[in-house]
Image (cartoon, rainbow, N blue to C red):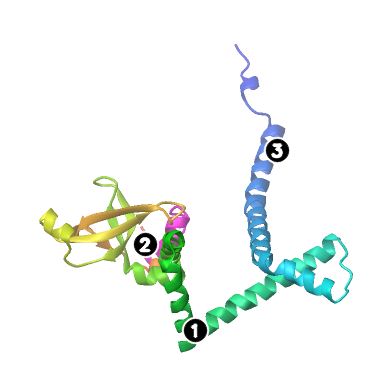
Amino acid sequence: MKNNSKNKPSGFGDGIRKAFMTGLLFCLPVSLTIYIIVWLVNFLASPARGGIKYFLHFFGAELPDTPLFNGGVTILSALIVAVAIAFIGFVSRNLFGRFFIGLLEKILHRLPMVRSIYSAIKQIIDTFSVGGKEETFSRAVMVEFPRRDCWTIGFLTHEGATEFSRLAGTSLVHVFVPTTPNPTGGYMVFVPANEIKPLDVSVADAMKMIVSGGALIPSEMKHDS
């Protein structure tokens, strides 16, 4: 009779493997969060970091090249840029700010290469911003995609008669079907209006479900069996 013990992992080895996987699942999101925060702080600090050092050097202050000093300058630079961005957002809400931003956009739209880049970036940001999603995506729906009897979540982007409806010979609605877990990509599909099923959830909750790969289900969609 053959001994199959060699094919079975030992209890000690199996425990180490499980402990490693548990630690990895804990450390990975924490480390990625820290990495993104550090990257964001450095990104915000980059426009002001050089100016602060030049300002201190201009007044004769000593600039020690130490991690503590450089970290302090980075954090201060990020705070200055964040305050400046908030100030721009505040000013843009009044008449003068809207006029200035409109004038700046007109200038950008007249520059050949800059116009294409700016328009594409602005459209993407407006579409997937918090306010943009609610305005662009009127509601979350369930649609058969990519084949019959296979359902997925989509967002209704347009209702009403269009040239597409005339060519198809039936009333079509425009639905954006995002990919998981990155909803910035996806597919635009034209679906007969009577073949979509509206979902009784907000656009934000439906987006959370897509990003989580279906793991986060809104409470109003849960039903006891």
Q: Label 1 amino acid?
A: Gly
- In terms of depth relative to the viewer, which is nearer, 70 or 15? 70
Marks 2/3 in contact by CB < 8 Å: the verdict is no
Q: Label 3 amino acid?
A: Ile
- In terms of depth relative to the viewer, which is nearer, 159 or 154? 159
Q: Secondary structure at mark 1?
A: helix
Quarter of the image for residue 7 reads top right
Bounds of the magenta span? 204-222
Marks 1/3 in contact by CB < 8 Å: the verdict is no
Mark 2 Cα-neighbour bin, 10 Å: few <14, some 14–19, many ≥20: few
Q: Earlier in the sequence, mark 2 or mark 1?
A: 1
Q: Which residue is mark 1?
A: 97
Query: Which residue lies at the image location 38% right of the left edge and 71% below the top edge?
Result: 134
Query: Which residue lies at the image location 46% right of the left edge and 59% below the top edge?
Result: 216
Q: Is residue 92 above or below residue 38?
A: below
Per the image, is 93 magenta? no
Q: Which residue is mark 2?
A: 223
Image quadrant containing the N terminus: top right
Q: Earlier in the sequence, mark 1 or mark 3?
A: 3
Q: Which residue is mark 3?
A: 16
Q: Earlier in the sequence, mark 2 or mark 3?
A: 3
- In terms of depth relative to the viewer, which is nearer, 14 or 165? 165
Q: CA distance from mark 2 to mark 3?
A: 39 Å
